[in-house]
Amino acid sequence: MPIFGNGRRVAVVAGLRTPFTRSGTTMRTATAEDLGRAVVSELIARTGLDGRELDLLVFGTVIPNVLAPNIAREVSLIPSLPKSVQAWSVSRACASANQAITDAADQITLGHADVAIAGGAESLSNVPILHSRGFSDVLVAASKAKTLGARLGAFTKLRPRDFIPVTPAIAEASTGETMGQSAEKMAKINHIPRDEQDQFALRSHRLAAAGTQDGRLTAEIMPYYAPPKYEKWETSDNGIRTDTSPEQLAALKPVFDRKYGTVTAGNSSPLTDGAAAVILMSEEKARALGYKPIAYIKSYAYAALDPGEQLLQAPVLAAPVALKRAGLTLKDIDVVEMHEAFAAQVLCNLKGFESKQWAERAGYSAPVGTVDRSKLNVMGGSIAIGHPFGATGARIVTTLSNELHRRGAQFGMLTVCAAGGLGCVMILENAT
Ligand SMILES: CC(C)(COP(=O)(O)OP(=O)(O)OC[C@H]1O[C@@H](n2cnc3c(N)ncnc32)[C@H](O)[C@@H]1OP(=O)(O)O)[C@@H](O)C(=O)NCCC(=O)NCCS
């Protein structure tokens, strides 16, 4: 039964993103809140949306700023929006922007909202660095001390190891396994050789370079001037390597299993800063306000599996559910957009779609099927473009909507794998 078929149709009216830049480069001085505010302000300006029409704003982020944990509210306080806009933040690891978009879409379907902005932002240049437990205990004790002597006394308890800061790792809290180690494990289980991973990474760079060169990708990107001096700017993604080659990729050493591994810096997505957002409206409201929708959200599904198993394989479980909810099969899908955390993960997901065992695990008798590579990530993906965790889902929804329109194609499917063993699949329909 199509989820959105019973309710009001939800239209993607427009989407936009900042350039995606490698962490520590041009946008390193911007926080995730800065990036989110910039993209939402520009999206409103470009579409001419009257801020008073906006009911709600949902934003995703993975590593939140502890001083501003509700990033959505910080973003919604821009001058072009009234303070009465509802704003909340969501976290579903790398599918956080998808969660923001489907939350907003649900509100529209239910009739609780007509106009929403949803997206996400991440600044991996600005991850919080924490004090150790020992240092924190001393600071708390010192703050409670009633005399100067007691305060100074608290500091005498510090030991050298207490000065070692704690940085968030891109690792599972439950298993301790990093994303890269999980990708490596999946490559081994599913027999994905190194050269296939490198070829896929090369394809990502070449297609993203072509999309940048001919303006298809840059049309979705606003120029970003980095605070505080606004002297440095970026107009396109700075991780796309126009000059990479099979030989260069083959020469890179494995990072996560140095001895027997196949996952390298070349076939992984890089740590990235960026933000992306979409405007969603009920079909009726879009018509009433004179907007031409680009796509409709036809269905979506989330799935989860044991993070200790194959961490990034949950899209394989979500895809048959999303397709069924849309009343479609893979044969009906004209364009497929898959988040590329690692080339190994995409290739494992593709194998999973073809597997009867994975279909049965999801409760279906037949596999999803073989994805036609000529329809897959036609302007590259996260390996080349970059992957600001909280923002990627909104980038992909924007790109897929625009690509369906450009091709005059009808249906598109997007998949995002996420930490925690989570996965998201959405089905979009061309509205133009
Ligand atoms: C893999 C990873 C550890 C690499 O980090 P890094 O070492 O800082 O990466 P770099 O960009 O510096 O690349 C390392 C080297 O490979 C080279 N390289 C990377 N990609 C290349 C390519 N496509 N072609 C040629 N050379 C390449 C770089 O030039 C660099 O060379 P140098 O050391 O001579 O300067 C990091 O990107 C990472 O952790 N990625 C995964 C992120 C993740 O887990 N995301 C979650 C997914 S959901």
Image (spheres, rainbow, N blue to C red):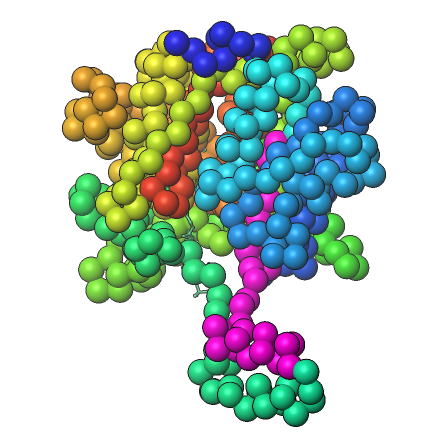
Q: Residue furthest front?
A: 146
Along the line of sight, which residue is nearer the eye, 41 or 61?
61
- Image x and y of residue 153, in percent: 59, 90
Q: Is residue 142 visible?
A: yes
- Residue 126 in magenta? yes
The image quadrant of residue 303 is top left
- Image x and y of residue 15, in percent: 63, 29
The answer to whether 323 appears left or right of 5 in the picture is left
The image quadrant of residue 213 is top right
Name which residue lies at 26% across and 49% down.
308
Which segment did they paint magenta? 118-145
- Image x and y of residue 256, in percent: 31, 60
- Residue 264 in magenta? no
Along the line of sight, which residue is nearer the eye, 82 or 286?
82
Quadrant where the N terminus lies? Answer: top left
Quadrant where the C terminus lies? Answer: top right
The answer to whether 105 appears left or right of 304 in the picture is right
Name which residue lies at 62% across and 34% down.
58
